[in-house]
Amino acid sequence: MKKIRVGIIGSGMMGPIHTEALRRLGYVEVVALAEATDELAKVKSQALHIPKGYGDFRKLIADPDVEVVHNCTPNAFHFEVSKAIIAAGKHVVSEKPLATNAKHSAELVERADKAGVVNAIHFNYRNYPLVQNMRAMVRAGELGRLFLMHGSYLQDWLILDTDYNWRVEPGAGGDSRAVADIGSHWFDTVQYITGDPVVEVMADMEIVHRTRKKPKIAMETYAGKVLTADDYSDVPVATEDAATILFRTQSGAPGSLVVSQVSAGRKNRLYLELDYAKGALEWNQEEPNTLWIGRRERANDSMIKDGSLLHPEVRPFAHYPGGHPEGYSEGPYNLFMQVYAHIASGATGKPTFSTFRDGHDEIAICEAILESSRSRAWIKVAY
Amino acid sequence: MKKIRVGIIGSGMMGPIHTEALRRLGYVEVVALAEATDELAKVKSQALHIPKGYGDFRKLIADPDVEVVHNCTPNAFHFEVSKAIIAAGKHVVSEKPLATNAKHSAELVERADKAGVVNAIHFNYRNYPLVQNMRAMVRAGELGRLFLMHGSYLQDWLILDTDYNWRVEPGAGGDSRAVADIGSHWFDTVQYITGDPVVEVMADMEIVHRTRKKPKIAMETYAGKVLTADDYSDVPVATEDAATILFRTQSGAPGSLVVSQVSAGRKNRLYLELDYAKGALEWNQEEPNTLWIGRRERANDSMIKDGSLLHPEVRPFAHYPGGHPEGYSEGPYNLFMQVYAHIASGATGKPTFSTFRDGHDEIAICEAILESSRSRAWIKVAY
Amino acid sequence: MKKIRVGIIGSGMMGPIHTEALRRLGYVEVVALAEATDELAKVKSQALHIPKGYGDFRKLIADPDVEVVHNCTPNAFHFEVSKAIIAAGKHVVSEKPLATNAKHSAELVERADKAGVVNAIHFNYRNYPLVQNMRAMVRAGELGRLFLMHGSYLQDWLILDTDYNWRVEPGAGGDSRAVADIGSHWFDTVQYITGDPVVEVMADMEIVHRTRKKPKIAMETYAGKVLTADDYSDVPVATEDAATILFRTQSGAPGSLVVSQVSAGRKNRLYLELDYAKGALEWNQEEPNTLWIGRRERANDSMIKDGSLLHPEVRPFAHYPGGHPEGYSEGPYNLFMQVYAHIASGATGKPTFSTFRDGHDEIAICEAILESSRSRAWIKVAY
Amino acid sequence: MKKIRVGIIGSGMMGPIHTEALRRLGYVEVVALAEATDELAKVKSQALHIPKGYGDFRKLIADPDVEVVHNCTPNAFHFEVSKAIIAAGKHVVSEKPLATNAKHSAELVERADKAGVVNAIHFNYRNYPLVQNMRAMVRAGELGRLFLMHGSYLQDWLILDTDYNWRVEPGAGGDSRAVADIGSHWFDTVQYITGDPVVEVMADMEIVHRTRKKPKIAMETYAGKVLTADDYSDVPVATEDAATILFRTQSGAPGSLVVSQVSAGRKNRLYLELDYAKGALEWNQEEPNTLWIGRRERANDSMIKDGSLLHPEVRPFAHYPGGHPEGYSEGPYNLFMQVYAHIASGATGKPTFSTFRDGHDEIAICEAILESSRSRAWIKVAY
């Protein structure tokens, strides 16, 4: 019973999440972790019970024991690291965004294709059972013509001007923040369900806090201390806290999205409504096990994630009986379930999961949004 | 105990609703009803237990027994009828929209001002206790700076191409349908809460059904009969079924609104989220007795309409104890409570209720939205 | 157009609610109000715009101008006042409870029957459109066999030991408080829907505050003053703050009800779940315009109150289009709509509304509950 | 980095769930699986990627490579298997119920104590972050005196008389079914939060289907075939489909629970309301990331599971940021996190997790409920 051996680069929030999801598969082994320094690699690999720790990601990639590499680095490193993985001819699973601009992401798509490596990007929200079921309903023709899409992706973790994070630093993650970080998830999820790509956008971005307060020394140092004005320095902010966006899809349907990281009380609310001729779909990631289906001529449906109610092809995405909630952790689990089944079966056939192509598409949309907000005009997406 | 005597013009959906709300006041008497013909006036005034019935609205206005006139006619007649009421020097309460274009609505504002008559427009949603409370919270400074507004107003009564009504007829209600009919309510409610007028809009309108099926003879005639294709004629539709809208307010805050009459399962869902620095407000007209208040640093609030929890000045808008739901009917009741208290006290002081000025403002916004959708550009609102 | 003339006895919370609901009918006129004293009658009748004010309820009953009398007195007076109305041969509408014990309530039923007067009791919750629709679904056989009933009626207005009201006074309202005041509404609503009377009960009553703090002088006197311990006197409490109840119905189905006036955050939450073989019904009075219908073999239903979705015979109970919420005030309005249509048509045929018989039934259940809690045993209801 | 080695007995629904949760820990290795036969052990161990497969559970227990054994057998085997694990001096984690009667469960508690082995039972619902937080709030004294508890545990998987499963067979799982299977979870969760044991019960059990239809041959055989009456045999049912239960706790507070496996549309709805003097707690396992806290003197709280809002000691139970839902799978994960930290640290100190003692307590409550339903009287729990 030979296991597929994996290396993880990066141990911030996502590295451990990847590690844990991989272990649930049973036939995949996380054999190595890379971090910024030897010391950090040692500490983190021990904490995560991973046998090897590398202080240089290139060494992990070069390790012949590693067959697949997960790129869980900060956004600014995604391009370089993924390029190196591909260059080594290894399968690659990248955190999103694929890169920080469309030129880079297009290059990665091309390189991965040429190298013939399996490539995946971690768009997790598609992998909820009820998201899969919405897609299955659309594909089965149960809903008819698409009339209108709308929704929001709201968080509150950057609402205060003292909320500070590498993501607000100029250049750290590209020219967009809220749209690139979370708006991209919304578009991926909706396009996955509808199968109808966004072709044109009209956007209005807003920086609520034009300067933010950066703690002068690392937060850990302040433990137990109340910060005063002197402990902060003002840093100008160039990326949006919020955006309002209109769009049109290939089929001609209009759409609207609101993205915000400054909406009090919203932690991670990816919310969508898709209005079709024969029914409307409403789903909220924060309560992912219920799908509302609006109906004109009968009572609305409130569908609980339950094997007996799902389309047959969706059932493998639901691991527990109805009423036993699937959660965030089943997103990466379901993604990797598909990726590693694909790898295990020889990587033939069309992938069922999100690939680098999907990662690039989201960056192309994001760049059109940026351009639209600057020019105050409708902009076509250049995929 | 002399009662204030009122005449109602029009007995469609809104005339009876006005009549009933007026009767609840106890000191107002509905003495006359006008309809299109003598025969209809007779039948309807008897059905509504109103003493006099007039087949000509001008006769009702001229009746010296009538002190206040309610204009409940179809949209296309609003301007002419209100103008006649003002010309007679009588107080006027109009259904919305105030007129079918901004030129007419501006004229009515000016005429009413000059005549010195009390003038009101039926924007009912402001009158829910929790809408009043949101406004009171904003005015009391509890919420800080306004960051972002978003929401939707969704219905499904025109989702089928066989759904037909005078409102879809060209010219019957102006160049806009969904935005004028329901979008205007959303803007009025939000502006009332925030006190921050919309100054610029960017809109994208959509006609889902470019032709609709009009029954060849009146629907009543078809009772008990299944209609076939031959029973319909195709009528081209020129007004929008849906619109996606971006806007900016005077204070510089961005906003987003989705309006639709083709969203399955939504009956009358006026939904809003207002993101302020110190808390976010979420409210849904279909469940009007709960207000969600998002918080960053503590649990979110779920406030039930309850006298003890409302701002003191809001309490008169809540007629029943907490947990005893206020409904749609308390909207006009609360509006008329204010209007007739104003009239009874000699019409001095600034009105607390929606006036013709508010009616005009919504039409101005609507015209900017139409212009923006045509030109695909941001348009400033010309109030 | 002769109006039906009504007198109201009592102007506490319910008198004005009856008055307003009656006025909405259009063909009923409230001509007189009775209160405890001439002075109070004068003040209150003027405030409510009622022509005549009587300081003695017997005078109101004797007034030949009064055809129907509404008994809105405190509970302890219900029996005596209703008896006098019946004795005068006038139609009677009583607030609940019908009396403070089953002996008295049975006597009223008998007297009303003998006198041949129209008699009604204000069980308002049956009159919500979706409650009517649940009953219609049951009667149409859509739901099959009844398996189980459960629910709760929760309030919080007596949660503090400083919450004081005549209802907690010994003797003021009979031996039961929470069950008599609100539990009775739950049983009436559920029995109305199921058509299956409660035959046996097992109850456990709880007095959370065995003494309560009664302000030494009237609350009004304390305006603007913070009360201290000296301003209160301790009063022993003999009636329950909460009760847990099991029951069985005539058809043999089991049930469970929790009643409480000390549940924080619950204002007036009458909540019920009725489990039938072919579907389960869930409804909450605080959000009365949505009915959840549980399903085993398909998605659950979430039905919005909407004319097109209701059983035809239920539609007159829904006054506004779907999405326009019906509220508390439409409860008495719908009751009186039925009562006065019955009176206007000569009081022939079986009443569709709640009568004294229903009022008596609820008192019989309440007495069985009291007896069960005392004896800690199952007790059969003696109707 | 030596891993703790585990054997799993049983590979029905729970064996794989245990396996997966254990793998997430990173320092635990599932080395062996036991099943009923060698053949089944081979097939299932390969499917689950477990190295060794045993056709006899005694061999797994005897394997010196196995340090901890998880008992995931059907209920009827729990006693015998756990007894054997303890006899071998190995740590034991049992699925619930601990045994099928209180005599056996008491014996297991005693044997485990004497043997000094770590013992745990899989009550998973306590391990949701918000359940932990409710307990922390109670222990911190934030809520004051306990007034009342109520709730329900509802499912619909046995609503049809053709729903058949070993759990309905006489003797397969003891004299109780719904209460033993799911009611026990409710009591464990509530007692864990309140710290206030149930001392007396009053119950009414109901068998909705007194006979059930058992397919004459295994369901798999029928694939693609519509079953007719001839394909079934009637089997009498002796265990309850539903129960209504009253109880009192040590502190004197009353409680009510409804348990049902025949409530249409409810998949696994463990629902509880705990009314305390200073606030009420409402939580529903099907949407486990929101906690409602009722308040009398301010708006109610709607708390999202979010690290910053949780009591500090609860934070390790929340693995993902706010708005990233924790689901069913984190229940066993959190239990095993505690169990294996305890084992890894030498099994000193008081366990923080559910032990055999808790398993026994629930069986004692269940037996009192059975006795109460038979005798129709209040019964004290004999722990």
Image: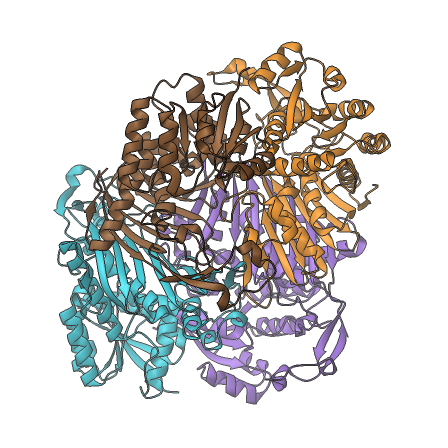
Chain colours: A orange, B purple, C cyan, D brown
Question: How far across and down, in percent of the image, does residue D73 sit?
Answer: 44, 39
Residue visible at 35% across and 73% down in the picture: C335
Left/right placement of residue B310 relative to residue B271 reads left
- Whether residue C273 appears in this view of the structure is yes
- Residue drawn at the location 72% of the way across and 19% of the way down: A65
Location of the N terminus of chain D (image quadrant): top right
**Which percent across, then down, holds residue B177?**
68, 65
Q: Is C123 left or right of B24, judged from the image as shown?
A: left
Q: Decide if residue D296 is in sight here.
A: no
Q: Residue sitting at 30 percent across and 25 percent down?
A: D113
At 63% from the left edge and 53% from the top edge, which residue is drawn? A312
Number of disc labels: 0
The quarter holding residue A45 reads top right
Residue A301 vs residue C330, the one in the foreground: A301
Depth order, front residue of A318/C51: A318
Question: Residue A295 location in percent, x, y?
Answer: 59, 63
